[in-house]
């Protein structure tokens, strides 16, 4: 394992890529509505990324074909935008985007409602977003990786939901995925010591039902084993002596 700690200057560069990711996610979230296809979201995202002077991080990564992952309802992550997949009132759609600017990566995700959604979906989305905040609050110099996972997992399970184990967060910097892996489960005071200058993407995937997932024949789309819905939020966070700093705000 090789963990690269970042200087203040590098973190500043990552903040610039992070801001672009946020602008893309905001632009895409703003147009989400019943009847649009996930490819409509993809087109808006790609234009926005290029207009802001960045490059997409996902397109071409292990041959992934798009700039976004769009994962609807029981799709957990890595849903591939499609011209024929239309958003339907009552759906939730997770939108995941990564960019690279000046050699530094940014990566973030949100889950947004399509029109009016059920109370259960509303709770699922809120708990997932809050669990990310709990994880971020645990990203402290001198703490351990297990503190982050335990914070996310404890919050999610107290709400009666489950955390996905097969996909995890990650270090990020001059590569989209760097060491260490950042699980959304764990035990406090265990695992790697968190150091100043580490930058990690924390990305809880939370299932309304059981934790198990499987990957569809398209080799990308991860879905829940039991067909129940799933939500996903992600931020890039710098661990600094002044506390965690969200770079994708
Ligand atoms: N945010 C996801 C991740 O960090 C998205 C990767 S999708 C891929 O793993 F296409 F780039 F693989
Ligand atoms: Co990520």
Image (cartoon, helix red, strand yellow):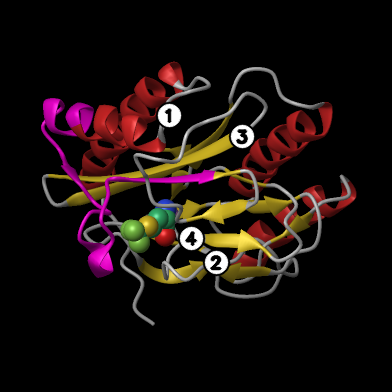
Task: Give the answer, above or below, for where 240 lies relative to 91.
Answer: below
Whether label 1 lies within 8 Å of ligand 2 gets the answer no
Left or right position of 110 against 25: right
Q: Secondary structure at mark 1?
A: loop
Mark 2 or 3, closer to the camera: 3
Residue at x 82%, y 51% (from the top left corner): 161
Spatial CA distance of label 1 from label 3 is 21 Å
Question: Badge 3, how many Cα within 10 Å: few under 14, some, many 20+?
Answer: many
Residue 93: percent from the left, percent from the top?
Answer: 55, 37
Q: Say whether disc 3 or disc 4 marks the residue closer to the N-terminus.
A: 3
Spatial CA distance of label 3 from label 4 is 15 Å
Mark 2 or 4, closer to the camera: 4
Mark 1 or 3, closer to the camera: 3
Whether label 2 lies within 8 Å of ligand 1 gets the answer yes
Residue that mark 1 sits on: 249
Task: Give the answer, above or below, for where 189 lies relative to 2.
Answer: above
Q: Say whether disc 1 or disc 3 marks the residue closer to the N-terminus.
A: 3
Whether label 4 lies within 8 Å of ligand 1 gets the answer no
Residue that mark 4 sits on: 221
Q: Start and end of the magenta stretch? A: 47-71
Left or right position of 190 against 47: right
Left or right position of 9 against 91: left
Residue that mark 3 sits on: 92
Q: Which mark is residue 167?
A: 2
Say which quarter of the image contains residue 186: bottom right
Question: Badge 1, how many Cα within 10 Å: few under 14, some, many 20+?
Answer: some
Residue at x 43%, y 29% (from the top left corner): 249
């Amino acid at each position: 394992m090789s963990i690269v700690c970042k200087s203040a200057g590098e973190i500043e560069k990552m903040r610039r890529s992070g801001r672009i990711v946020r602008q893309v996610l905001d632009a895409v979230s703003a147009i989400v509505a019943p009847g649009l296809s996930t490819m409509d979201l993809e087109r808006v995202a790609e234009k926005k990324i290029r207009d802001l002077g960045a490059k997409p991080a996902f397109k071409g990564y292990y041959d992934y074909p798009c700039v976004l992952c769009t994962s609807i309802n029981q799709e957990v992550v890595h849903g591939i935008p499609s011209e024929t997949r239309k958003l339907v009132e009552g759906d939730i759609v997770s939108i995941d985007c990564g960019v690279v600017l000046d050699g530094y990566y940014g990566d973030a995700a949100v889950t947004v409602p399509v029109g009016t959604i059920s109370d259960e979906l509303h709770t699922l989305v809120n708990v997932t977003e809050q669990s990310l905040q709990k994880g971020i609050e645990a990203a402290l110099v001198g703490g351990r990786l297990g503190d982050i996972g335990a914070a996310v997992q404890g919050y999610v399970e107290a709400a009666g939901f489950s955390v996905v184990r097969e996909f995890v967060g990650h270090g990020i910097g001059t590569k989209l995925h760097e060491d260490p892996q950042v699980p959304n489960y764990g035990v406090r005071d265990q695992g790697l010591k968190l150091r100043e200058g580490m930058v990690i993407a924390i990305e809880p995937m939370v299932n309304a039902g059981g934790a198990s997932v499987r990957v569809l024949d398209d080799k990308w789309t991860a879905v829940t084993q039991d067909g129940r819905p799933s939500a996903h939020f992600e931020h890039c966070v710098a661990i600094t002596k002044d506390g965690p700093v969200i770079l994708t705000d």
